Amino acid sequence: MTEIPSFKTGTAFLAYMFLFENISGWIKIDEQHNSIGNGNSQATARANEDTKELFCLIWQYLPSLIIDAFIPDGKGKSALEDFNAGKIIVFANFYTPIYIKL
């Protein structure tokens, strides 16, 4: 069995899986919905306060992630500061949707 690459902290969990159906508690990332952020952000996959831990987890590991993710205006001093400022994390456009766990 192949191990799924993943990162975990607190309640946030990021794993790489290719699925073809929606899964409760996971955020679908695809070509049209490819960013996360707080409720005031312009995120297209999920703009909600419940993404804070996931945002901070991805922000922390951004340089070493396998997927191509970035913050359009660049990283600030801290993940929490960027999240509260309404910055978004944008994922590469995937032709097959991926899911990230809230």
Image (cartoon, helix red, strand yellow):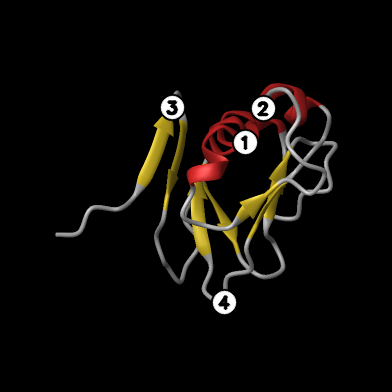
Given the image, on which type of amino acid does mark 2 rest?
Ala
The Cα atoms of the two marked residues, 3 and 1, are separated by 11 Å
Which label belongs to residue 21? Answer: none
Circle 2 is placed at which residue position? 79
Looking at the rendered structure, the secondary structure element under dot 2 is helix
Circle 3 is placed at which residue position? 9
The Cα atoms of the two marked residues, 2 and 3, are separated by 14 Å
User: Does the CB distance between marks 3 and 4 fall below 8 Å?
Assistant: no
The Cα atoms of the two marked residues, 4 and 2, are separated by 28 Å
| Label whose residue precedes the other's in the sequence (1 or 2) | 1
The Cα atoms of the two marked residues, 1 and 2, are separated by 7 Å
Locate residue 72, reporting x and y percent: 79, 49
**Image quadrant containing the N terminus:** bottom left
Circle 1 is placed at which residue position? 55
Name the foreground residue: 13 vs 63.
63
Locate residue 90, reporting x and y percent: 69, 53
| Label whose residue precedes the other's in the sequence (3 or 4) | 3
| Label whose residue precedes the other's in the sequence (3 or 1) | 3
Residue at the (63%, 36%) spot, across then down: 51
Left or right position of 59 against 76: left
Looking at the rendered structure, the secondary structure element under dot 4 is loop
User: Does the CB distance between marks 2 and 3 fall below 8 Å?
Assistant: no
Circle 4 is placed at which residue position? 95
Residue at the (84%, 48%) spot, across then down: 42
Given the image, on which type of amino acid does mark 3 rest?
Thr
**Which one is in front in this view, the residue at disc 1 or the one at disc 2?**
2
Q: Which image quadrant for residue 92?
A: bottom right
User: Does the CB distance between marks 1 and 2 fall below 8 Å?
Assistant: yes
Residue at the (52%, 74%) spot, across then down: 96
